[in-house]
Amino acid sequence: MQNQSSTFYQTHSPVLEAAVKAVHERSFYSAYPENPSPKTYGETADADGKAAFEAMLGKPFAELKQYKPEYWAGEEVSPYTQEALGITYPVFDTDFLLERAKADASAWASLSPEQRAGILIETLERIKGRFFEIAYATMHTTGQGYMMAFQASGPHAADRALEAIALGYEELKRFPESVLWDKPMGKFNIRLDKKWKAVPRGVSLVIGCSTFPTWNTVPGLYASLITGNTVIVKPHPKAIIPIAIVVAEIQSVLKECGLDAGICQLAADTQEHPLTLELAESPAVSLIDYTGGTAFGNRLEAISGKTVFTEKAGVNSVILDSVKDLDPVLANLAFSVCLYSGQMCTAPQNFFIPAKGIETSEGKVSFDEVAERFCKQVLALTENPKAGPFVLGAIQNPATKDRVGNSGSLAKVLLASGNITNPQYPNARTATPLVLETASENLALFSSELFGPIALLIKTHNTDQSIELAADLAGKHGAISCGAYTTDERIMDSVEEAMGAVGTPVSFNLTGGIYVNQNAGFSDFHVTGGNPAGNASFTNPEFIVKRFTWVGFRRPAAEPVSA
């Protein structure tokens, strides 16, 4: 065990050093290429990954190194085919999972930070070899388009996991392991041998979501593992297979190192018989990571005696004040609304536009013309057969499609939602964006998240009111992203000050190939923990240091030997 884990550390230490450096510099860094190019991943990687995923369908997932399941179950349905995947997973008694996690805690905690880092980076290398398989698994559980599924569940998730490893390693190495403490007292000195241990908090529960089953899961998973905690991964029952592959690879590497799978276990369940609260409320669980709806997130945060990290829902805004060229701005925003059919926690919903219009290089453009041109940009994308189906993907949850269908009565419809034909999957569950117009006085309509492809164009008295509304909503209801467009430095400063005060990051004047939805590992902090949208951030030091405690031990030092 010692030799194998040390070998992994020696092999991967250059990657770890580069990741630690990137954490500090916040510049671009990626250890895992995001382009699924045959030159990068191999000529047959895509076909092999697709075949591997298809070979799993209709069968038990037998890769886990876990034993004694109560029964096998699975209820995943592809949003593209609307057919059951037929994959079943072992379902375990919660007490059994917790006992295994506790039994294997000592062996994992006893490893050095170097050994754990080496093992964990090796798991990412193994997962890298299955990026395409995971991409197809993600497509057919979440409805993401192929490119997003590959990038988000593969390279971007691996980068976020590596970021957690790097920051965890950095925090564990922040202080010396031991020191001779020598305090002068005049005629004599007090000398103590002091040492410190980073003691893990205990069993960690990581609760996954249905739309980003790996990207949102691996930060907490790897943050807990690098700090010496054992982990139980509880995926959403409708999106198990992508993270099941990840857990299987982690268990495989653990076994090679002479360690037990109880260090990282999968806790699959069903919607009829959920295990989440059983696990979360158990006294054996010390740490909880959660991504999902606000109501359940609040319930988890209220459990006494737990350290809970949450990413919940938010109300994301775009503030339009003035631009140089309007069409590139609206094209960027239309893409942001269409991307994965608005099923992203960072997707914009509320577009605040002054009633008198916005200033551009072509002169003032009225509210109505801005709205009309925005809708044209949405249509240009959704009606493009080479882009629309692949950018929008499919709707993961039928309730989301119902929400879009039922929201047309809430306000003036500027662009009705419809279906989009996917040439590869004619049965795909789809919905194009619904664009509504409303006034700033209609606060009840736009003060909560309308999850899915729904955009509200809100007519405000002026930009100052737009800023005030966006900040007020973020402070009261949470926000994970904010976009702002202005050519006025004073306005930019006002937006920065107002949104910064409510813990909301702002993207200014984005056009081209970068969107408000996107966050970059090693540079952007995803969620700030500064408003009701969540109490944690991927990945700041607080996300790490709450997972262990420093414990000191001291004793009188041996007297120095006389010459």
Image (spheres, helix red, strand yellow):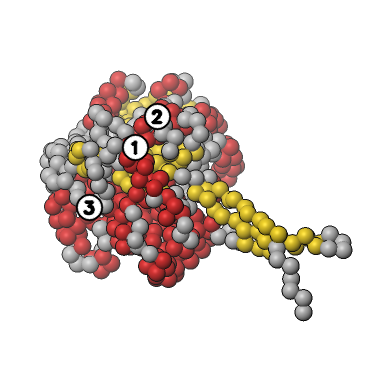
Q: Is residue 293 above or below residue 171?
A: above
Residue 355: give x, y in percent of width and height: 46, 28
Secondary element under disc 3, as helix, strand or loop, is: loop
Residue 314: give x, y in percent of width and height: 43, 33
In the rendered view, does 100 fall on the left or right side of 28? left
Secondary element under disc 1, as helix, strand or loop, is: helix
Residue 402: give x, y in percent of width and height: 25, 26
- Residue drawn at x 21%, y 43% is 89
Which kind of residue does numbered mark 1 sit on?
Answer: Asp
In the rendered view, does 436 fall on the left or right side of 42? right
Residue 260: give x, y in percent of width and height: 34, 54
Earlier in the chain: of badge 3 and badge 2, it is 3
Earlier in the chain: of badge 2 and badge 1, it is 1
Which kind of residue does numbered mark 3 sit on?
Answer: Glu
- Residue drawn at x 48%, y 66% is 17
Earlier in the chain: of badge 3 and badge 1, it is 3
Residue 140 visible somewhere in the drawing? yes
Quarter that holds the N terminus: bottom left
Q: Which residue lies under the disc numbered 3?
A: 63
Q: Which residue lies under the disc numbered 1?
A: 95
Q: Nearer the viewer, residue 506 or 364?
A: 506
Q: Which residue lies under the disc numbered 2?
A: 296
Marks 2,1: beta carbons within 8 A: no
Which kind of residue does numbered mark 2 sit on?
Answer: Phe
